Structure formats: structure tokens, C-alpha cells
Amino acid sequence: MNHPRYCPSCGTLVVKYSNPLPTADVIIYDEQRGIVLVKRGAPPLGMALPGGFIEEGESAEHAAVREMKEETGLDVELVGLLGVYSWPLRDMRCHTLTTVFVGRSAHPELLQAGDDAADAAFYPLDNLPGPLCFDHGRIISHFRDWVEGRRPLLPCAEDPSLDYGDIAYTRPF
């Protein structure tokens, strides 16, 4: 049950927002190797696209690049935005809203599991292991649509090569 909360000092009603938590995922695609999936080392267990929660002060693009490095050891270049996925039940832990990018790595041979990934490997699109976590099966289906020319990629809005705190805009809005 959700009870109203009041400030113990002044008695003012404290409003609590239960907003979705932002995440970022990346589909790394290599025409010869396929896509990168990680075997999750923490619940929910299964196979997943590399990704994770966006940290405070971080853009979705920065988070995508950071999560790829942490989970796969790969430095990536983001090619474009595949989509934003916000179905409230996509993650059993909490309501998340994920931004999914397509990227590439100049050195895919450096792939290795890291952070909370128990394993990381390339898999051909026509032979993916399961079970896939979250709504990643749907996301990969949309990715296939892009590969086959039935879906566009959108441009990335931010430059992930900027360091945290760099000024991204040089003129006022």
C-alpha cells in the first residue's frame, strides 16, 4: 500500500515520483561474426545485449559506450539509434526505459566478458542462444529489419567521444 509521506521537520507532503529508470543497450554487429550477446552473471539470468543503467550526469550514448567496454572489453563506435523501448514489464526488476544503439568495434577480436557478464561472444543472427532476457528478442527482430533494409537507423544525438563535463554546445539555444 502506498502511504503519503510527510517531511518530519516541516510536515510538508513529500511527493515521490516512480519514474522508469533509464538504460542503454548496444547491438554490436560484425558481418562475419554476427552480434555480441553476454551471458548475465546476475539475475535475471540468460543471454542479453550488452547494456545497463545510465549513471547520473551521463548521456545515453556515453552509457552505451561505457557499458560495452565494461561488459565486453570492446571500444565501440555508435552507428545509430535503433529505438527506444519502454514497455513497463520489459524488466521484471523495475520499470526501465532503454535506448538501443547499433555500433561497431574496430577490434572485435578483443571481445572478453567483464563486469557482471559471465561470458561474451559473437553469435550469428540465425543461430542465437537462449533464453534471451528482457525484450531483447523483440529488439533483435527490429535489428534484423534494419539489416534487411526494412527499418531505418536514426542518428545519435550526442557525441560519445566527449569527456564527462565537456561543453557539447557552443551557442545558446
Image (cartoon, rainbow, N blue to C red):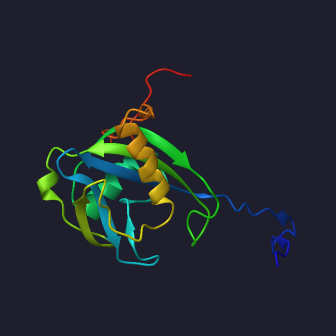
**In front: 97, or 89?**
89
Query: Looking at the image, which residue is at 38% across and 45% down?
Result: 144
Provide residue 4's location: percent of width, then percent of height. 85, 72
**In front: 69, or 163?**
69
Give the answer, above or below, for where 118 lies relative to 144.
below
Give the answer, above or below, for where 81 lies relative to 62.
above
Query: Looking at the image, which residue is at 28% across and 57% down?
Result: 36
Query: Looking at the image, which residue is at 29% across and 49% down?
Result: 28
**Quadrant that contains the N terminus:** bottom right
**Quadrant that contains the C terminus:** top right
**In front: 45, or 147?**
147
Furthest toward the front, the residue is: 126
Left-right relation of 70 to 54? left
Provide residue 92's location: percent of width, then percent of height. 58, 71
Residue 80 in view: no
Left-right relation of 113 to 64? left
Residue 25 in view: yes
Task: Kindly indicate the quadrant of the structure image that contains residue 118.
Answer: bottom left
**In front: 4, or 104?**
104
Task: Kindly indicate the quadrant of the structure image that contains residue 111.
Answer: bottom left
Provide residue 14's location: percent of width, then percent of height. 80, 65
Query: Looking at the image, which residue is at 73% across and 60% down?
Result: 17
Provide residue 153's location: percent of width, then percent of height. 42, 34
